[in-house]
Structures are given as structure tokens and as C-alpha cells.
């Protein structure tokens, strides 16, 4: 039997000393046939490695290297496993989560991320986003997209763009091609202007109408 801070059927505080560790033993009613473990003890040979003069460190450290370390001088909490996964609250208002491999977040309903200032996302290779229904982006001032290679948009339905200001399209090299199976319409309440440094060609497989 072992004394624990809390115990009960299917619940409680469960820390059992390892084989070979030094323990303090008591005897129920002074009966040598009814021993129980009061607790474990450090000794001159077996030390925790966490002792300091001001008693700032409180720790749980299992034999595999799983750790929970509370540092009263920093006000920090560190949770670490042998693989290098860490969860660190530094006592200064910051939390750092680190994993040598993967981190996954799963919610049965919603995940909300909110930052008072900036959010930065960086990936060494790919970033993917998928929505089963709607995907909405709202930008208060400027929206800048920079692509070093190619950009492709595949839309099964209708593309609608509502722009209150001006539209400026500039192709630095190459040409602009527009293909449409159902016709192309331009409408302006004022003037439509076309200009070219060389020539403008209008070609039709059937007839051309100019009004």
C-alpha cells in the first residue's frame, strides 16, 4: 500500500515509486505484517537535479524524461517530453509550443484565432486551405499578393468583381489573351478607348459590325 494525496475508485493521484528507489515505510498499528509506503526519499547518491538554494523549482520528472517544471523565480511552466515536444509559458505573457515533427488541432465545432496586432504564417513548402462551403476574406486597407511563379484561378460558377475605384492591369512581358465560348461584352457609361503603339486588328470568322 502507498499513501497518496488523493485516491479513489477510478480517480485520484497515481504516482508509484520505481523498483529500487528509496522509500519510507510505516506499519499499520505497529504491525510488521501490515506495512505501507509513506513516500519516497532522495539521498546522497540519488538526487533530483532540481534543487536550488531559494527552492524556486518544483518538478514532476518521470523515468522516460517527461517533465513538468514550475519555476517560481520566473513564474514559468515548462512541459516537455523525450521527443522534444515542449509547451512553455514563460511568466512574461508569452506561450511557445514547439514540436520536432507535427502539431495538429482538431475541434468538433469551431476554432477561433484572434490577435490584437499581427498574425504571421510561414511554411517551408506548401500552405493549403479548404472550405466545405464559404471562404471569406475581409481586408481593412491593402491586399497584396506576390507570386514568384504562376497563378491559376479555377471557378465553376460565376466570377463577380465590384470595384469602386480604378482597375489597372499591366503585363510587363508577353501578351494578354482572353478566350470565351459565349461572347465578350464591354459597356461604359462614358468612353471606351483603345490604343496601340503599332496597330489594332479586328478579326471575325463571320461579320464585323461597327456602330
Image: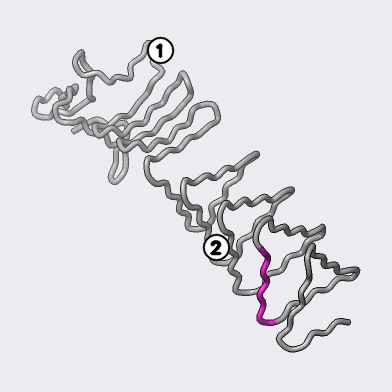
- Observer-nearest of 117 and 69: 117
Which image quarter: residue 200?
bottom right
Q: Are marks 1 and 2 in contact (CB under 8 Å)?
A: no
Residue at left 37%, top 23%? 58
Question: How would you rate the neighbour count of disc 2 (Cα within 10 Å): few for under 14, some for 14-19, many for 20 or more?
Answer: few
For disc 2, the marked residue is 131
Residue at left 64%, top 52%? 145
Q: Is residue 31 left or right of residue 82?
A: left
Taking 158 as reference, is 104 above or below it? above
Question: How would you rate the neighbour count of disc 1 (Cα within 10 Å): few for under 14, some for 14-19, many for 20 or more?
Answer: few
- Observer-nearest of 155 and 97: 155
Residue at left 73%, top 59%? 169
Range of the magenta residues?
175-182
Residue at left 17%, top 22%? 22
Q: Secondary structure at mark 2?
A: loop
Number of the label disc, if any, that sits on residue 54 = 1
Residue furthest toward the top? 53
Q: Secondary structure at mark 1?
A: loop
Q: Is residue 149 left or right of residue 20?
A: right
Q: Is residue 84 left or right of residue 146?
A: left
Tell me where residue 89 appears, x and y as whole percent. 48, 31
What main secondary structure does the magenta stretch of the protein show? loop
Which image quarter: residue 38?
top left
Of discs 1 and 2, which sits in the foreground?
2
Taking 208 as reference, is 112 above or below it? above
Amino acid at each position: 500500500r502507498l499513501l497518496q494525496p488523493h485516491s479513489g475508485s477510478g480517480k485520484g493521484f497515481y504516482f508509484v515509486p520505481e523498483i529500487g528507489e528509496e522509500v519510507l515505510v510505516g506499519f499499520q498499528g505497529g504491525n510488521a505484517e501490515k506495512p505501507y509506503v509513506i513516500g519516497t526519499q532522495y539521498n546522497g547518491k540519488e538526487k533530483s537535479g532540481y534543487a536550488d538554494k531559494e527552492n524556486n523549482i518544483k518538478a514532476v520528472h518521470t523515468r522516460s524524461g517527461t517533465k513538468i517544471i514550475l519555476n517560481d523565480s520566473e513564474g514559468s511552466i515548462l512541459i516537455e517530453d523525450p521527443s522534444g515536444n515542449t509547451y512553455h509559458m514563460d511568466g512574461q505573457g508569452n506561450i511557445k509550443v514547439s514540436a520536432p515533427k507535427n502539431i495538429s488541432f482538431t475541434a468538433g465545432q469551431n476554432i477561433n484565432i484572434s490577435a490584437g496586432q499581427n498574425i504571421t504564417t510561414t511554411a517551408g513548402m506548401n500552405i493549403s486551405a479548404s472550405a466545405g462551403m464559404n471562404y471569406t476574406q475581409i481586408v481593412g486597407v491593402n491586399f497584396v499578393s506576390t507570386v514568384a511563379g504562376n497563378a491559376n484561378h479555377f471557378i465553376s460558377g460565376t466570377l463577380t468583381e465590384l470595384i469602386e475605384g480604378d482597375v489597372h492591369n499591366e503585363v510587363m512581358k508577353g501578351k494578354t489573351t482572353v478566350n470565351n465560348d459565349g461572347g465578350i461584352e464591354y459597356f461604359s457609361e462614358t468612353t471606351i478607348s483603345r490604343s496601340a503603339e503599332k496597330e489594332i486588328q479586328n478579326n471575325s470568322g463571320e461579320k464585323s459590325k461597327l456602330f
